């Protein structure tokens, strides 16, 4: 289903956002409210960077899109598409958030649904700055997110960016 080139490129497209579990923590200071929309630059070792827009909604949900996996992006690296990303977040220790984002992935030639891209990460949000601290990115193969038939581990990515503000 995936050639080596496709797997490598998918790794490039994985936003550095998601969830690594750890114990609940004290609330963030009010000046570090993570709710908002951030424009990120995402990188992986030896790979070109890409842009991502991620929104942390009040109540703990996430919306995400990026410039590499989007079906309308001009991607010279591989023939693979992904849906918009959706997920969940919660506050972590100090100024961190724990996140998990899921995207459906499709074969670019057949448009067949082949699985899910899952990003789990911890990010630091300090004022309007977003910095990914840890991430784990995987493709879960098959139609069932909760019972995959295979797993392709893609490793981690880095992401840094800024919150969109009115001024």
Image (cartoon, rainbow, N blue to C red):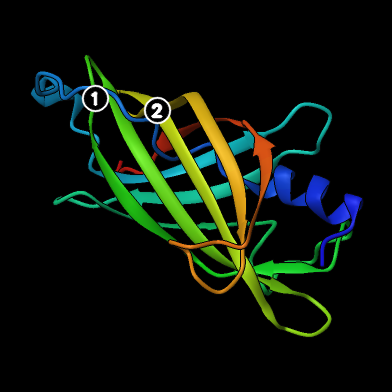
Residue at 68 percent of width and 33 percent of height: 43
Q: Is label 1 in a helix, a strand or a loop?
A: loop
Q: Residues within 10 Å of mark 1 (few under 14, many from 20)?
A: many
Identify the image quadrant of residue 1: bottom right
Question: Is residue 76 rendered to the left or right of residue 132?
Answer: right
Identify the image quadrant of residue 50: top right
> Between residues 29 and 86, which one lies in front from this camera angle?
86
User: Where does the image place residue 98, in percent across and percent down from the top left?
Assistant: 32, 33
Contact, CB < 8 Å: mark 1 with mark 2? yes
- 32 relative to 58, above or below: above
Residue at 79 percent of width and 51 percent of height: 7
User: Where does the image place residue 8, in percent across and percent down from the top left?
Assistant: 82, 45
> Between residues 99 and 77, which one lies in front from this camera angle?
99
Q: Residues within 10 Å of mark 2 (few under 14, many from 20)?
A: many
- 158 relative to 8, above or below: above
From the image, tell me which residue sits under label 1.
Answer: 92
Distance from disc 1 to disc 2, alpha carbons, whole Å, reads: 8 Å
Identify the image quadrant of residue 42: top right
Q: Is label 2 in a helix, a strand or a loop?
A: strand
Task: Judge whether residue 127 can be spotted in this image.
Answer: no
Question: Is residue 146 rendered to the left or right of residue 28?
Answer: right
Residue at 71 percent of width and 32 percent of height: 44
**In the image, which disc is placed on residue 122?**
2
Residue at 72 percent of width and 44 percent of height: 11
């Amino acid at each position: 289903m995936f050639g080596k080139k496709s797997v490598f490129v998918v790794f490039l497209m994985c936003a550095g956002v998601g969830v690594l579990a750890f114990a609940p923590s004290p609330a963030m200071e009010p000046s570090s409210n993570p709710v908002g929309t951030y424009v990120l630059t995402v990188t992986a070792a030896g790979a070109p960077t890409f842009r991502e827009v991620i929104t942390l909604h009040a109540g703990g949900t996430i919306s995400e899109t990026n410039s590499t996996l989007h079906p309308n992006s001009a991607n010279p690296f591989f023939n693979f598409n992904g849906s918009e990303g959706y997920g969940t977040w919660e506050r972590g220790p100090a100024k961190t958030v724990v996140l998990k984002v899921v995207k459906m992935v499709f074969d670019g030639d057949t448009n067949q649904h082949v699985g899910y891209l899952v990003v789990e990460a911890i990010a630091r949000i300090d004022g309007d700055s977003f910095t990914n601290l840890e991430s784990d990115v995987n493709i879960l193969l098959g139609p069932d997110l909760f019972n995959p038939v295979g797993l392709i581990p893609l490793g981690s990515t880095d992401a840094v960016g800024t919150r969109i503000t009115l001024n």
